[in-house]
Amino acid sequence: EFLEVVAEAYSVYGAPREFTEDAFAAMESVCAPHIQAYVAYLRSEPVAAASLYLSHGAAGVGWVATLSEHRRQGYGEAVTAAVVREGFRRGAGFANLQASPMGENLYERMGFSTRTDYQVLVPPATKV
């Protein structure tokens, strides 16, 4: 169910389903001592997902996703908050994430702040 939510949600960015299937091919990719996946349900149907990656005192929040027909109803915030709470419960000193354009305002409302930006480097086109 985690994979299904993430695959549909990330298709908005052009991520092919095969990428998601490869990333979550084994149960250990969503359930291990330092990894925990979360799925939010509405009337027993999965609607949102997120994952916790706990390492070196940091609670990494990843793969926050909401099915397109359920966006802007609080499910993404709920799974993100669950990940952050669990990270702190397990001893993390801070939580971090990489915000997508769609999630940036949500995370600011939740108290996250931008500490750094990434520069995207693209190799120059080669002449044939």
Image (cartoon, grey):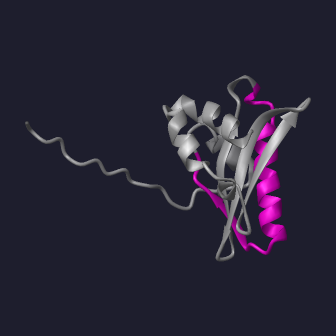
Instruction: Please state the horizontal and vertical placement of residue 90, each as a whole percent of the image.
Output: 81, 71
Residue 121 x/y as whole percent: 31, 51
21 vs 124, left or right, is right
Residue furthest to the right: 43
> Which image quarter: residue 61?
bottom right
Does 35 sit above or below residue 73?
Answer: below
Q: Is residue 99 above or below residue 17?
A: below
- Specify the quadrant that holds the C terminus: top left
In percent of width and height, residue 64 lies at: 67, 45
| Residue at the (51%, 60%) spot, across then down | 116
Q: Is residue 36 magenta?
A: no
Residue 50, above or below 17? below
Q: Residue at x 69, y 75 (%)?
A: 57
Camera-nearest residue between 87 and 39: 39
Question: Where on the picture, by quarter, is residue 49?
Answer: top right
Q: Check the picture and name the quadrant holding the N terminus.
A: top right
Judge from the rendering whether residue 73 lies leftward or rightward of residue 94; answer left or right: right
Residue at the farthest top position: 69
Inspect the magenta stretch and tell me whether residue 78 lies in it.
yes
Q: Residue at x 75, y 30 (%)?
A: 72
Which residue is drawn at the image coordinates 71% and 30% (left, top)? 67
**Residues in magenta?**
70-99
**Percent x, y for residue 95?**
70, 64
**View extreme (front): residue:** 26
